[in-house]
Image (tube, rainbow, N blue to C red):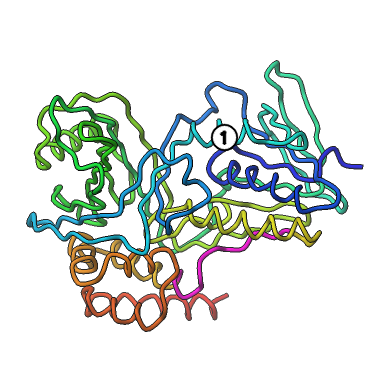
Amino acid sequence: MADYDVVIIGAGAAGLTLADRMGEVNQRRDSPLRVALVEPPRGPHTPPPRTWCFWEPDGGPWDRLLAARWEDLSVVGPDGAEYRSSAAPYVYKMLRSADVQAHVRATADEHVEQRELYVQRVADGTDHAALTALGPDGDRVVLTARWVFDSRPPSPVPAGRTHLLQHFRGWFVRTAEDSFDPDAAVLMDLRPPQPRHGVAFGYVLPLSTREALVEYTEFGRTPLTTPEYDLALKDYCDRAGLPEVEVTATEQGRIPMTDARFATRAGRRLFRVGTAGGATRPSTGYTFSGVGRQAAAIAEALVHDRVPVPPVPHRPRHLAMDAVMLRALDSGRVSGADFFTRLFSANRFGDVLAFLDGESGLARELAMGWSTPVAAMALSTADHLWYSLSSRFSP
């Protein structure tokens, strides 16, 4: 008999979301599942606290933990023109990872065990998988499980034609005077100097009238150094009319943006979730909504004793559109600043957010496509189709 029915590796957004679902699963089952959430011991392998932003209608499962929420959004073009709109039917939301971790620890039932282990190896098997790990004292531990869900970054990364990074650094800032509207967020400010390939932008997420997360982000091939990010953030604060800010905390990271396909099944008993399982939307870097859809599908399968294969939470046509956009940005055919300015200035923000989250219809998507640089996007579409066909028929 295996030690656990389910082992979840990693306590990031994907691991915590899935662990949070396990209580509901056990409530709906006649016999509860034995679950372990495995994360590295606190130390160099522990990720720093971070924020997760996403959009969804009001009444979501994490609403009670939100650090902030915004119904009004704005996008600022390279020339300083501001386009402001309601996010309806969505609300843009922010969660802090520390709050989610505390919630999962506090609400986990007696069947969900949290273990601090550094996983070294996962071996698939016919009846169960086996994890070899090191404990906090360096002792070797072997666990077995019917199902293993691994949220760690895959190694090697799947092959794809285009590989960009959404890389960023953010300052949590405080001002001496009221400087922010807590009900409105700047989703994308395209006034920073633009790279030759990709796009650079800032955004401002107010937490109060005097506090906000100010972030500098690029879609590009290589990240910046920390001093380069700080210089870009200082320049952006000046452009945004925030010359005097006190930096109270920072966050920094990188998210893959690629047309590579991530398999959600790694073996008979092994599955990948989160970014490792294709939950990241290639064109935006947003992952949290995809994580939620994967966790919901896994939970439903476990309730009914089905094989819990996580779905890829994005439709094939959306992944194809994303591949075209990434290629257009990476090749330099399209200016990212021009692309996003046109997209948001010509369409309701709610419609754009629906598309970016995979909830839009084909007719609306085609209409939005006409607001982007049509000739350059058409050329990139033809390029993508030719590459896809030649790859399919080449040895």
Report the magenta residues as a range: 308-319
Q: Is residue 245 above or below residue 137?
A: below
Q: Position of residue 72 (x, y in %)?
A: 25, 55
Residue drawn at (28%, 76%), measured in percent from left and top?
368
Q: Quadrant of the N terminus?
A: top right
Residue drawn at (38%, 48%), measured in percent from left and top?
93
User: Mark 1 falls on what kind of element?
Assistant: helix
| Amino acid beneath label 1 | His
Front residue of 391/188: it is 188
Residue drawn at (80%, 45%), measured in percent from left and top?
33
Q: Is residue 299 above or below residue 322?
A: above
Image position of 370 (left or right of 270): left
Residue 128 covered by magenta stretch: no
Q: Is residue 251 visible?
A: yes
State the image quarter where residue 297 is shown. bottom right
Q: Number of labelled discs? A: 1
| SS majority, magenta | loop
Q: Which residue is mark 1?
A: 103
